[in-house]
Image: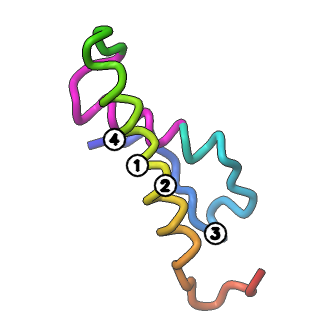
Amino acid sequence: MCRSIKTLRPPMTPDVEDADITAAALQYVRKVSGFHHPAAHNQAVFEEAVDAVARATRELLAGLEVRGAAKA
């Protein structure tokens, strides 16, 4: 689906920045919604979706246990 979203989990990407997570969330919401830039009447719900996906991504990455990886 979103083939160009890069893998963010360690050790694939050891230093994940908030900008990386937000960019991935934005790309995901754009793909799912079909809108690259939403109309003004859809802007708020679009931004809320990006925030929710970014939040879920942070929680996912924080909770993942990667076998063989050093603990931070």
Sequence-earlier tag: 1 or 3: 3
- Which label lies toward us, 4 or 2? 2
Q: Residue at x 52, y 55 (%)?
A: 7
Mark 4: which amino acid? Cys
Marks 1/4: CA distance? Answer: 17 Å
Name the residue tied to disc 3.
10
**At which x and y percent is residue 5?**
46, 43
Name the residue tied to disc 1.
52
- Secondary structure mostly taken by the magenta-highlighted segment of the chain: helix
- Residue 11, label in figure: none
Question: What SS does tag 1 mark?
Answer: helix
Marks 1/3: CA distance? Answer: 21 Å
Dividing the picture into quadrants, the one containing residue 46 is top left
Name the residue tied to disc 2.
55
Mark 1: which amino acid? Ala
- Which label lies toward us, 2 or 3? 2
> Looking at the image, do the residues carrying marks 2 and 3 touch, with CB atoms under 8 Å apart?
no
Name the residue tied to disc 4.
2
Question: What SS does tag 4 mark?
Answer: loop
Nearer to me, 13 or 38:
38
Asked if 40 appears above or below 16 in the picture, the reply is above
Mark 3: which amino acid? Pro
Q: Is residue 29 found inside the magenta-colored segment of the image?
A: yes
Marks 2/3: CA distance? Answer: 17 Å
**At which x and y percent is residue 51?**
46, 43
> Looking at the image, do the residues carrying marks 2 and 1 touch, with CB atoms under 8 Å apart?
yes
The crowd level at tag 1 (other Cα within 10 Å; few <14, some 14-19, many 20+) is few
Sequence-earlier tag: 1 or 4: 4
Sequence-earlier tag: 4 or 2: 4
